[in-house]
């Protein structure tokens, strides 16, 4: 941010900084989503048995309402 404050046109410098920041954030998010998708669709994961259901102290699935 020092480059924005010391800039002759702080509004333009801030807009450029925000644009660059958002572009890099979107690219990072895209890479993470692609990596997760590639990992989840791998044959190794597809051949694994499903995970057992989790139960709380009452013997109920705490994620039941979320499904």
Image (cartoon, rainbow, N blue to C red):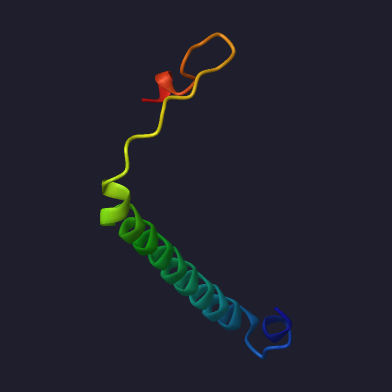
In the rendered image, the quadrant that contains the N terminus is: bottom right
11 vs 33: above or below: below
The residue at the point 59 percent across, 13 percent down is 57
The residue lying furthest to the top in this view is 58
**Foreground pick, 21 / 48:** 48
**Foreground pick, 27 / 23:** 27
The residue at the point 38 percent across, 57 percent down is 36
In the rendered image, the quadrant that contains the C terminus is: top left
Give x and y (percent) for residue 31: 40, 68
Q: Examine the image and state in which quarter residue 50 appears.
A: top left
The residue lying furthest to the bottom in this view is 8
**Foreground pick, 60 / 1:** 60
**Foreground pick, 26 / 2:** 26
The residue at the point 32 percent across, 37 percent down is 49
Give x and y (percent) for residue 47: 27, 46
Q: Examine the image and state in which quarter residue 58 appears.
A: top right
């Amino acid at each position: 941010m020092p480059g924005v404050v010391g800039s002759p046109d702080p509004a333009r410098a801030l807009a450029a900084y925000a644009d660059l920041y958002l572009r890099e954030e979107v690219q990072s998010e895209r890479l993470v989503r692609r990596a997760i998708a590639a990992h989840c669709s791998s044959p190794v994961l597809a051949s694994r048995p499903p995970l057992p259901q989790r139960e709380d102290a009452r013997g109920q699935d705490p994620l039941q309402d979320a499904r």
